[in-house]
Image: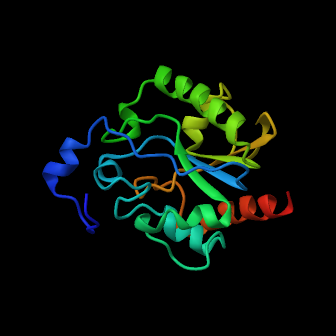
Amino acid sequence: MPRRTRPTPEEIRAAKGRTVPDLIAPDLLVLFCGINPGLYSSAVGHHFARPGNRFWPVLYAAGFTGRLLSPFDEHELLERGYGITNLVERATVGADDLSRAEIVEGSRRLAAKVLSYRPRFVAVLGIGAYRIAFGRPKANVGRQELSIGVSRLWALPSPSGLNAHYRFDELVSLFEELRRAAAKG
């Protein structure tokens, strides 16, 4: 698909069930793990692409990037030691369209990737999805007790613009904490 700022409504509808390729490499500092791609992201083939998603502005404000990246610049994350994957690969209208079983199965696929690529931290973006995926119903945001191999787990709120539970400055503060931990090792 040629680089455009907006997919057509037909392209968005046709994106249901498609996937967005992982942005991953060995030995990353942080592998960000979304719940699953939305239709908009699937239509353009880039992570966190829907206008209103706060992922890219939060990464910049938290110091992960030196400039505000767009989803079309996502490859630049690898150069800084960051990557992106999803618990569930298939695109849906919203995460509510996923079953608990899909999310749990997604944690198994994630574990296989993590054991292969060995990121320092895996940040699951969605506390509810983290709780389901890893069977931790009382987990809180932040560093988790669980690890996958050498990779430490971290739970963060979803940066979706639909997640009204967290203001932008709160998201930035939580992401900054992860960035500082990743920089320390």
Left-right relation of 139 to 14: right
* Residue farthest along the top direction in this orientation: 101
Quadrant for the N terminus in the image? bottom left
- Evaluate whether residue 132 shows in this view: no
* Residue farthest along the right direction in this orientation: 184
Q: Position of residue 184 (x, y in %)?
A: 86, 62
Asked where in the image residue 114 lies, by quadrant, the reply is top right
Asked where in the image residue 15 lies, by quadrant, the reply is top left
* Residue farthest along the left direction in this orientation: 10
Please tell me which residue is depicted at 19% across the width and 42% down the height of the picture: 14
Please tell me which residue is depicted at 43% across the width and 69% down the height of the picture: 70
Left-right relation of 79 to 93: right
Looking at the image, residue 59 lies above or below residue 16: below
Q: Nearer the viewer, residue 16 or 139?
A: 16
Looking at the image, residue 153 lies above or below residue 75: above
- Evaluate whether residue 81 shows in this view: yes
Q: Position of residue 59 (x, y in %)?
A: 58, 67
Q: Nearer the viewer, residue 174 or 165?
A: 174
